[in-house]
Amino acid sequence: MEIVKCKKLTKSYQHFNVLNQVSLTITENKIVGLVGRNGAGKTTLMKIIAGLTRATSGEIEVFSKNPFNSLLVSANSLYLDDRMDFPGSLTLAEILKEAKRFYSNWDHELAFRLFDYFGFENSQFHQSLSKGKESVFNAIIGIASRCALTIFDEPATGMDAAARKDFYRALLKDYLAYPRTIIISNHHFEEMEDLIEEVILLHKGEVYLQQSVEELKESWIRLQGSRNVVNAWLAGKRVLEERQVLEETYAVAENTYSDEEMISMKREGIKVSPVSASEILLYLTKDEKGGVDDVLNGDAPQ
Ligand SMILES: Nc1ncnc2c1ncn2[C@@H]1O[C@H](COP(=O)(O)OP(=O)(O)OP(=O)(O)O)[C@@H](O)[C@H]1O
């Protein structure tokens, strides 16, 4: 079943398209990673999906309805970011009790187990939490609500390494027991690579790719070997990254090699190895302008 369907979705601010003709479909019961550089349009897209912002043009359906001001969508979805606003008069325990009234699939026992595990006190107030603890508390709400569509916008902001690991583990475990559709944006893809089934890469407001993580990893390959031999195998291929270390060339190239070619390559002394999805995404979105070193060296941008 399709949970989210966008067709030629555009969002403009002052005549600038921050989302440009975005078409995509997200089917039910999967964890989707929404990635892209700063300003790529991730938050804007997630807010449109959650019905919090209206698109300028194009079509969007969430649970087969236009999400903007839709009761059906707001009853079945939850958008969480680091700007969550809770009533200042409620303690954390009271907020969880309110959440129980609001979300039909809410697991109160799980919420309080996580609450205790992460060391929260019933009488604490949200506004008195540290940045990382605020994110952990929001994440508890995101997990325990078990909304049919849960959208986490940079959920791990400020969390320490242990809390981030625990959060992703808890989310995965709960998702496996109670599958639902989850969209997560996070600049540290490597932290959630094991969790994500499908990745949507936004680049400058456009969908650059939408693929399963498996497909993405199979599409690229790392070659390592002596310069001339590697270069001969790179001819005519799309190359994401190429580095020279002494006499060795390291390259990440599109993997369109046949089995026979792979065997020949290895026979010629080339080491072939897989590339992580986070590395591929980094290479795909790196700036065309040259590196930050050029800026620090005072070189003019190209
Ligand atoms: N209310 C607004 N008015 C004008 N421009 C906006 C507004 N909201 C977002 N933008 C612009 O839209 C673009 C996309 O912003 P968005 O927050 O969606 O990006 P993002 O991919 O989530 O970025 P980040 O990774 O930095 O959080 C940015 O250039 C931003 O400045």
Image (cartoon, rainbow, N blue to C red):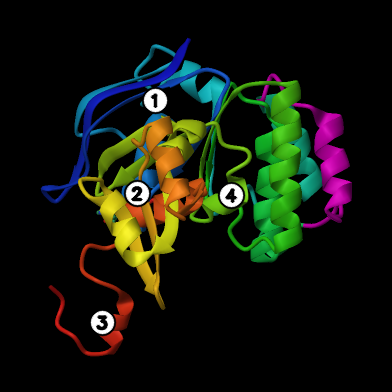
Q: Residue at x 33, y 51 (%)?
A: 284
> Considering only order in the chain, which callout, 3 or 2, is on the residue closer to the N terminus?
2
Residue type, label 3: Asp
Q: Earlier in the sequence, mark 2 or mark 1?
A: 1
Q: CA distance from mark 1 to mark 3?
A: 47 Å
Do residues under tags 2 and 1 come within 8 Å of each other at their CB atoms? no
Q: Residues within 10 Å of mark 2 (few under 14, many from 20)?
A: many
Image coords of residue 145 (percent x, y): 68, 30
Q: Is residue 120 left or right of residue 239?
A: right
Q: Amino acid at mark 4?
A: Pro
Front disc: 2 or 3: 2
Q: Earlier in the sequence, mark 1 or mark 3?
A: 1
- Camera sees residue 285: no
Comparing labels 4 and 3, the label whose residue is closer to the camera = 3
Say which amino acid is labelled 1: Asn
Q: Earlier in the sequence, mark 1 or mark 4?
A: 1
Give the CA separation, mark 2 to mark 3: 25 Å
Element class at badge 1: loop
Residue 110, compared with residue 298, is above or below; it is above
Identify residue for label 1: 69
Marks 1, 4: nearer the viewer: 4
Asked if marks 4 and 3 touch (Cβ < 8 Å), the reply is: no
Residue that mark 2 sits on: 253
Label 2–label 3 contact, CB within 8 A = no
Residue 294 circle label: 3
Secondary element under disc 3, as helix, strand or loop, is helix
Q: Nearer the viewer, mark 2 or mark 1?
A: 2
